[in-house]
Image: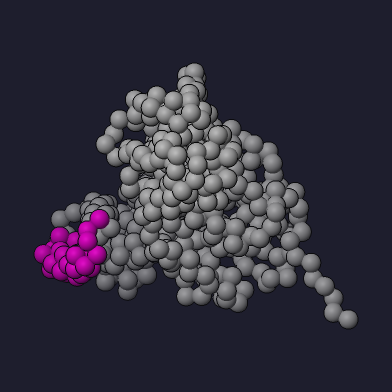
Amino acid sequence: MNTEKTLQAFGSDIEANIRSIKEILTAEDILVYRFETRDATECAAIYADGITDKELLGQLAAKPLAQAAAPDSRSAAKKLLLFPERKDADDVQTAVGEILSGNPVLLIDKIPGAIILGTKKAALRAIMEPQTAITVKGPREGFIEDVKTNMSLIRRRLKTPELQFETLTVGKRSATVVCLAYLDGIVDREIVRKAKARIEAVEIDGIPDSSYIAQFLADRPDSLFKQAGTTEKPDILCAKMLEGRIAVLVDGSPIALSIPYMLSEDFQSAQDYFVSPARATISRALRLLAVLVAVFLPALYVAAQLFRLQLLPFDLLMTISGSIRGIPLSPSLEMFFLLVVLEILIEASIRMPKYVALALSVIGALVLGDTAVKAGLVSSPAIIIIALSGISAYTVPDLTGTISIVRMAYLVAAGSIGTYGIPLLTGALLYYLISSDSWGVPLLAPFSPLIARDLHDSLYKAGLFSLNTRPKTLKPKNHTRLHKKESS
């Protein structure tokens, strides 16, 4: 609602109050339920059909008032109501906002003001394991699109009075609830203050998803790398909060944000904390190797063909030479063509129905690829390299979009400058990463700048008793998170 407008106060005449609300809420789904008390005093409940629990409204509000004499004040009326959640509304604008949120407004004749009843009801999907973060071991719960449910999932894991929730309303027309969650005794309060100020300063018609809030929270919204962590799992978000981060929940989105963010987070998995440290370290090393393969392999193949054939072993060179004989496209165009086909197949498989997408994957990977090779349009080594690069990129799902862009850039550099283009672009990319930060935390932390104590849970996973302090990079108020008691 626009707070700059003068608030219109309720009067004591019920008909005038109903007209004031209906002048603003003219839609057909805004209904007025009229009933009378035992001594024929008129009452009315105004609600939005479909998002209000009408059964509760009738049982806990209309029935008790209909069986009693008319109350002489709002406080007396609230004593008759059986709702655990109820509050006063003195002006029409507040009442309208509550109605649109799913909470009905109760009006009683000759009593000024209104009573807000907490009977919001929304069709919600069940809490289940998110498709973007499937694990073999560990919790399987995931966030859903209701911010209240998501808050309860966090509260269930962090049973401490230090857990704080601050709710804000963003969007002139959507009035979306955005919730900041943090641990008061751990988090840097300056970050909380800045995050709250940035969200309060947002002026936009609507917030359909948490990605919109991520753009407003970012210091560099146009950055190639994201500025906030994302997750759909409550256990991961709570672990990040325990390290000193802020969680941002947005009503209508199952994806929670966390700030500050470090690039090494995307190489970690929830399952790393349910297996041995050695296994977790190997898994993280494999993810890093896969990202390097996804980015560099196509560019190195093109550079070797065009400029440095001696980089390839003789036997491999002879095999590739036999495969590329008669191919009409240059190595660069061949790679670009296959990368474009790969991106098209990925986009189509994501947006098509599940079973059609499965058939499309088979057709694209087997039929189309095999036919292209037999027709002499592309070579077999090129298809193998693109397939390996595409699969490797999805070992770190949160970086897939960035990897695709960087892979294209390396391909351009290799095809135009040759082998010199790859180290030049690598230097530029490292400079970009080193100079980037998220809320004062460098993206490459704890490697640049080097913080030895924080290396215990980066690409290397140490044992539990080595993780007795929180990351120094995040500047937590309380650094100790584990006290090991000596047994007598």
Residue 97 visible in the current orientation = no
* Residue sitting farthest toward the right: 488
Looking at the image, which is closer to me, 322 or 19? Answer: 19
* Residue sitting farthest toward the front: 39
* Residue sitting farthest toward the left: 375
Q: Residue at x 58, y 40 (%)?
A: 76
Looking at the image, which is closer to me, 69 or 243? Answer: 69
Please state if 179 lies on the left or on the right of 344 as rendered.
right
- Please state the extent of the stretch shown in magenta in the rendering: 351-379
**Residue 75 location, quadrant:** top right
Q: Position of residue 432 (x, y in %)?
A: 52, 42
Q: What sort of colour scheme is used for the picture?
A: one colour
**Residue 96 location, quadrant:** top left
Q: Position of residue 37 (x, y in %)?
A: 44, 41
Q: Residue at x 48, y 25 (%)?
A: 12
Count of picture labels: 0
What secondary structure characterizes most of the magenta part?
A: helix
Q: Residue at x 57, y 76 (%)?
A: 275
The stretch drawn in magenta includes residue 170: no
- Residue 230 sits above or below residue 16 on the image: below
The stretch drawn in magenta includes residue 357: yes
Residue 161 visible in the current orientation = yes
Q: Position of residue 105 (x, y in %)?
A: 44, 38
Q: Residue at x 32, y 71 (%)?
A: 316
**Residue 399 location, quadrant:** bottom left
- Residue 162 sits above or below residue 220 on the image: below
Q: Quadrant of the C terminus?
A: bottom right
Looking at the image, which is closer to me, 211 or 29? Answer: 29
Q: Quadrant of the N terminus?
A: top left
Looking at the image, which is closer to me, 452 or 37? Answer: 37
Q: Position of residue 372 (x, y in %)?
A: 15, 64
